[in-house]
Amino acid sequence: MQSTEILKSLSAPLVLVGAGKMGGAMLDGWLARGLDPNKVVIIEPQPSAEMTALVAKGLRLNPKDPIGHASAVLIAVKPQVAPDVVPGLISLVGANTVVISIMAGRNLGFLEQALPNAAVIRTMPNTPAAIGRGITVAVPNARVSTKQRQLADALLAAAGEVAWIDDEALMDAVTAVSGSGPAYVFLLADALAQAGAAAGLPADLAARLARATVVGSGELLHRSEHDAATLRKNVTSPGGTTAAALDVLMASDGLAPLLTKAVAAATKRSRDLAK
């Protein structure tokens, strides 16, 4: 069954707990794929005007009446408030409910302790989810059925690609690569702009060139059948300008070892925060 059909076939409510930037992006993706607003319940103390407007289309916002068991509960609150919020969701969880967390640093053990006997999935999305171009990595606990996994995949796919893993220990490295990764790309764009200005370009032109180059190259990588290494080689003429720059970037103390150290540092910090 296609993800759109899965979303349209929900028999019980879909509950979104926390509708900030990431939760709101998820909601936008679900509605764009045809999810009936009547099947959505939002629990959010500070809803946006756009979200409040959806009430007229049938979406339930902070209902006072009991919600009952949900098809899925997606938790998108800040991890620091999770101990106060998550245990209170137990009334939403029935035998067929799948609980999906996009909270950073809150592992399966925390979710299983807060919601005993629940089928839970821990995920790590990234910020391009806001435009439907993110990637989310998900790891289920042993209670998640094939049908629940399919529903979770359909919900997460509204924000971009989805990858599944079985070893939760990999989540720290996932966080370091894709969770934090957009910041590395933005740093590259900023550094490239500054380098262009240092080479004599007007600052506004250097910033424009850097932005367009990063965006265009990313789109080319997205659409191409070739991997990044092949695309790099395709741009590089022996003895040319690109080769001269890459001699610096690919030196023993260049970009690759620096990124390896950066990802290792982020991975360690992710492990430390989970303790």
Image: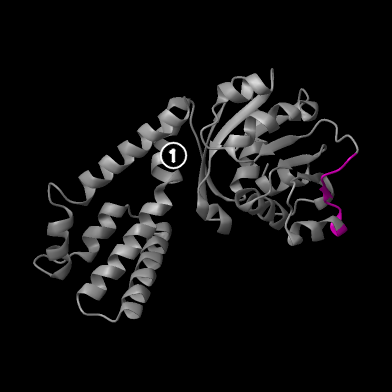
Q: Which residues are magenta?
A: 56-64
Which residue is the extreme one toward the right? 65
Identify the residue at image location x=43%, y=38%. 174
The residue pinned by badge 1 equals: 175
Identify the residue at image location x=68%, y=44%. 18
- Give how far across and how far down residue 3 sits, in percent: 66, 45
Identify the residue at image location x=79%, y=30%. 92
- Whether 85 is among the magenta residues is no
- Give how far across and how far down residue 273 sits, in percent: 45, 31
**In the structure shown, which secondary structural element does the residue marked by tag 1 occupy?**
helix
- Number of disc labels: 1
Identify the residue at image location x=14%, y=48%. 253
Q: Amino acid at mark 1?
A: Thr
Judged left or right of residue 10, residue 122 is left
State whether residue 112 is above or below residue 20.
above
Asked if residue 149 shows in the view, the reply is: no
